[in-house]
Amino acid sequence: MKFADLHLHTQFSDGTFTPEELAGHGARLGFAALALTDHDSVEGCARMAAACAAAGIEFIIGAELTAEHEDTEVHILGYFLDAENQTLLTEIARFQAVRQQRIHEMVARLNGVNVPLAAESVFALANCKSPGRPHVARALVKAGLVGHLDEAFEKYLKKGRPAWVPKTKVSALESVGLIHQAGGLAVMAHPGLNRTDEIIPALVDAGLDGIECFHTKHSTALSERYLEIADRFHLLVTGGSDCHGFSKGKPLIGGVKLPYAHVEKMKQAVAAKNSADGRHATAK
Ligand code: AMP
Ligand code: ZN
Ligand code: FE
Ligand code: FE
């Protein structure tokens, strides 16, 4: 049986693996297909594509866009994106600028509560265009200002804590459109994490293509719930580990194995969509 992991992060956002290391783990675990879904970035996809090709793994270009719907954060996954689409790249650059500015604001707030972290240490550690709270947490640990990553989130970084800074986010409906105009499929990420089921009908109206039913943090009962919702709204079914590397101990890759038949359905959907649009099909 062939399996896929369609939710993975690298050092191009807040993962700790390089694309080559991630593809290596995918090969070791026997995956037939992998998608890279860094936060607000497609930058790692070229290297991941090459590493997967070398390992005999099918690669799907992806990204995880941070969005919101009625003040609730939602993550929208894009798959089979045209990584050279100018509108997509312009918008991603804007999201990344917001993320970089937010690091400065989080550091200023930390300094305001007498935590002497320098923004430069966060940027040096992140070494990517799409920095986020995990990088601030790692910089705090590295500087000896907290004992471990969870302490950084609990004390300073989670919502309501002194260094929490909201992200200016694109609307989820717009992010679905952004993915579509780049030839991709738009999928709601880990709905069970946010428990935001009430927004699914609006996303479906905006053209949502799929829902991530299988995820590390979905119990069997939650996966079944979203499989039922996918069926009801005629949505594609996706799944992935959301592996961020070794940042939380053992890597999560291998913990979610999406049957390859779902990838086949995604490829059929993207091919049908793009031929209907008169666009060059990006599915291979
Ligand atoms: P950001 O996009 O900058 O708001 O950061 C969100 C990322 O932080 C997600 O990818 C999560 O994996 C990570 N995260 C959120 N809460 C925690 C936590 N309590 N401990 C560790 N990582 C977390
Ligand atoms: Zn992340
Ligand atoms: Fe997410
Ligand atoms: Fe993720």
Image (cartoon, rainbow, N blue to C red):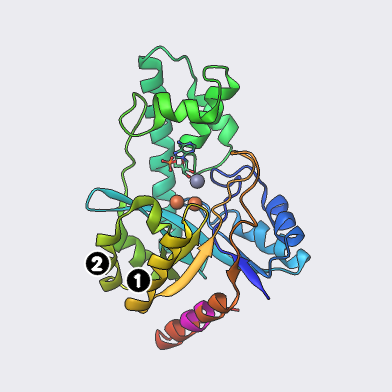
Q: Is residue 52 above or below residue 100?
A: below
The picture quadrant where one finds residue 231 is bottom left
**In the visual, does 96 lie left or right of 241?**
left
Q: Which residues are magenta?
A: 266-270
Q: Tell me the residue that label 2 is attached to.
A: 202
The residue positioned farthest toward the top in the image shown? 114
Percent across and percent down for residue 215 are 50, 58
Q: Tell me the residue that label 1 is attached to.
A: 229
Q: Secondary structure at mark 2?
A: helix
Q: Tell me which amino acid carries mark 2.
A: Ala
The residue positioned farthest toward the left in the image shown? 70
Q: Is residue 156 above or below residue 246?
A: above
Q: Earlier in the sequence, mark 2 or mark 1?
A: 2
Between 154 and 245, the one lying in front of the other is 154
The picture quadrant where one finds residue 100 is top left
**Residue 269 is inside the magenta segment:** yes
Between 231 and 74, the one lying in front of the other is 231
Percent across and percent down for residue 244 are 58, 46
Locate the C terminus by quadrant.
bottom right
The picture quadrant where one finds residue 174 is bottom left
Locate the N terminus by quadrant.
bottom right
Q: Tell me which amino acid carries mark 1.
A: Ile
**Residue 117 is inside the magenta segment:** no
Viewer-nearest of labels 2 and 1? 1
Q: CA distance from mark 2 to mark 1?
A: 14 Å
Report crowding for label 2: few under 14, some 14 to 19, many 20 or more residues within 10 A (C-alpha).
few
Between 220 and 119, the one lying in front of the other is 220
User: Which residue corresponds to the image point at 24% horizontal and 61% vertical from the top-left?
Assistant: 198
User: Which residue corresponds to the image point at 56% horizontal and 41% vertical from the top-left?
Assistant: 128
